[in-house]
Image (cartoon, helix red, strand yellow):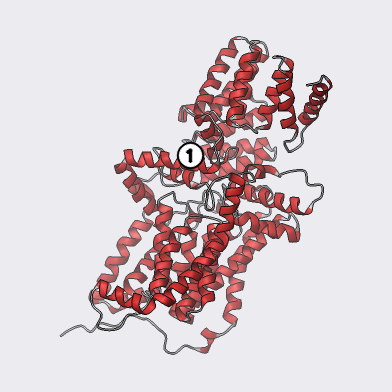
Amino acid sequence: MTHKKTAPVTSEPTVHPFWRSRWLALILVVAALAPRLIILSQLTESPAFTHPVMDSEVYDDWAWTLADSWTNPDYAGPHGEAAKYLEGSFYMGPLYAYFLTGVYLVFGHVLLLAHLAGILVGVGTVLLTAAIGRRLYGPKVGFVAGLAAALYPALFLYDTALLMSVLLVFFATLALYLVVRGQERDRWFYWLGAGACLGLYALGRANILIFAPVLAVWVFLALWKKIEPGAKGFWVRLGERLKNNWKPGLRRVVFLTAGVLAFVVPAAVHNAVAGGEFVPVTANGGINLYIGNNELATGEYVNPPMVDVRSDPGGRRYVSGLEGRPLTYGEVSDWWADRAGGYIAENPGRWLGLLATKALLFVHRHEIMQVANIHIILGWESPPVVFGLLAVLGLAAFVWDHERRRRMGAVWLFVLVYSLTIVAFFVTARYRLPVVPLLLPPAAWAAVELVRRLKEGGGTRLKALALVVPALLVTNLPLGLFGVELVGNDAVLHNNLGTIYYDQGVYGLAVDSYERAIRANPKIYLTYTNLGLAHLKLGMRTEAERDFERALAVYPNDNWALLNLGALYLERAELGDPSALDTAEAYLRRSLALNPGHPETYRNLMKVCLARGDYAGAAAIVERGLSVAPDDPYFLFWLGGLYAERLDRPAEALDLFRRFYETRPYTPDHEIALEWIQYLESRGY
């Protein structure tokens, strides 16, 4: 007796009117708003809310600078970190900064409203997820997928953060929704809209441009359509597609490409004008490639130890110092990419292992929160871990759902290509978020199909278990079993909180946060250095010196620890301990060798030379710094002072003071420079 196989659950021939009710959209909106608003209400009491850090700080300062400069007649110059990102080519994607600029232009610099704007975008993503599910799988699956998006923890956590992820997830979901609509009704505006969404996405993160040509091939050949029966062989089928579809296919590609270029071209033009170089969107690809592919890489974000990316975005000063000339952001990106390529060529075996680790991290349940560790601020012991289940159900849907494989083709291609672009660099929770709304509809379908197959029993059950169980093990077993060791969310969160408290001047709480971070992971050298800086602010120099030495014990080439130890010994020398001067110089020379682009190192070495009465040596130090960063305000100011007071070079001093006086923001040193300008001009120079 043969066992009769049951066909997979595919479509819903009859659906209760409830599932087509418009009230379901309202339910989804409420379900999406509830967790996001609850979290926002709790975040308002956190220092992270009133004092953004890292990427959030950059976007906030950038947006407020733009809004202020466009509307304030008394505009006094860039706010906070913005100055580093307003000159030259785009280093970070401008998408979210311009989004916040729009919010600030309408409502003023109100962070609460900026968070609320992001939440509304997140609600839009929920509705789009439901719409994709409804069109591909029917209203029941559509509603379940939308509800899952509304309550998906990583989505609502990042929707409340002041980060670009909320826009990228929205535009990726909208782009694929428009592709699905274009497959149903081949109208030009669907393809133009899909391309525009990809172009807007590229303004945030340019890796989407790798998917764009793949999608173009898909829409050109209309691969969601079946060819005529009887055509056999790959080349015959391809010929049939080209014969029947090349004209409408070309039209689709033209509109899709126009949509992408409508946003990418202005960014490229900006970079050509402001930076004098060809950079399609952003110039951070090289350093991000290096972060994910070097001898210290672990698969997650690990800051290059030789660079302080907060004060030196992309390591521009660092690389310029090594090369002995000022470099553009694009040149610096190429420099990092060359280093990453060299590492890969010299270590192909380890690199392949690193790729495998990153692939595991991408599908694993562990959420690498990196910037927005909101779960700890809220008192949760760990971030929610559901992605592993989502990845398994997505795989099951791809394997089992033959009926929709063509209609879902663009979605599957996006998930595949996008995942590969992340694995090529490094993995964080927010980087894999764009695939979540697109996996939820097939995952909802696969959950129902899995239950059906398990109930059916026999070979069907065994095959289902053979697919699902190993996948669940891979995506849910502890990472340690695979030999993967990460920094840890707790350590990153407490280090970031310490930075917030430090910037706010609450140094006691900063010390407490840094010590918590060290307890969570004592192998992070940067936390010891941050702790030392906080101890310095509290006047605890002995403790600070111990912290910097502990940092060097973990990582001997910690440039910041060397720089600050040099400064401490220089201070001792200035207080009357001449033997400390040689030690200070040794630390500072090591620091300069590791990072020849940091102004403080030059300043302290200049002080060492001045303490010895070596004015020419002091000038040579600053001249070297000025050759690396010719527009650095304080190189101009210090060298002007040396030329005017010590080296009898008044004409050159006047030029340097004039250049310094044109820099912004305006400081008390500008008054000193103005006095020198007036004095030297009165002497006829």
Residue at the front extreme? 684
- In the rendered view, tell whether residue 378 sits above or below residue 187: above
Indicate the secondary structure of the residue bearing disc 1.
loop
Instruction: Count the numbered circles shown.
Output: 1
Which corner quadrant holds the N terminus? bottom left
Q: Percent from the top left, x then y, of residue 514?
A: 57, 37
Residue bearing the label numbered 1: 521
Residue 232 appears anywhere in the view = yes
Q: Percent from the top left, x then y, of residue 580?
A: 59, 13
Amino acid bearing label 1:
Asn
Q: Residue at x 48, y 39 (%)?
A: 521
**Left or right for 333, reference 353:** right
- In the rendered view, tell whether residue 573 sits above or below residue 486: above
Residue at the left extreme? 1
Crowding near pointer 1: few (<14 within 10 Å), some, many (20+)? some
Q: Percent from the top left, x then y, of residue 383?
A: 50, 55
In the image, 392 versus 129, the foreground residue is 129
**Left or right for 112, reference 320:** right
- In the rendered view, tell whether residue 99 sits above or below residue 312: below
In the image, 251 versus 398, the foreground residue is 251
Q: Quadrant of residue 581?
A: top right
Which corner quadrant holds the C terminus? top right
Q: Quadrant of residue 345?
A: top left
Residue 390 appears anywhere in the view = no
In the image, 85 versus 627, the foreground residue is 627
Q: Residue at x 44, y 46 (%)?
A: 289
Q: Percent from the top left, x then y, of residue 194?
A: 51, 69
